[in-house]
Amino acid sequence: MAAKHHATAAELHDQAAQHMRHAVKLFDQDRSAVAHDAQLALSLALRALSHGNEAAKLFVNVASVGAS
């Protein structure tokens, strides 16, 4: 389960980075599009962080059970 959350986090980080790169390309052309892509990228990054945290919690739980 932790691996699934980690994979989801990695995928969301990649998507966020793509949107940020796209926002940079649009900066001079359309400032409202930049704001939209930047907001979407931040939202994806927050979701990725949440999945990363959940993966870490699950890993710690599994490791503590294995150590006992």
Image: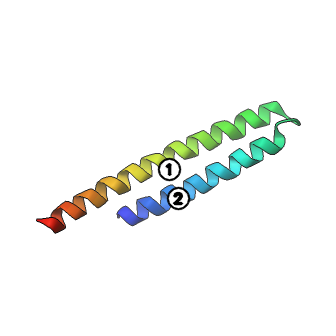
Marks 2/1 in contact by CB < 8 Å: the verdict is: yes
Furthest-right residue in this view: 29
Label 1 Cα neighbours within 10 Å, binned few <14 / some 14-19 / many ≥20: many
* Image coords of residue 55 (percent x, y): 37, 57
Viewer-nearest residue: 36 or 26? 26
| Residue that badge 2 annotates | 10
Report the disc number at residue 48.
Answer: 1
Furthest-left residue in this view: 68
Query: In the picture provided, is 14 more to the left or to the right than 34?
Result: left
Q: Residue at x 44, y 60 (%)?
A: 6
SS at circle 1 = helix
Looking at numbered disc 1 in the image, what kind of residue is underneath it?
Answer: Ala
Furthest-front residue in this view: 67
Report the disc number at residue 8.
Answer: none
Q: Residue at x 36, y 62 (%)?
A: 2
Q: Residue at x 72, y 33 (%)?
A: 35
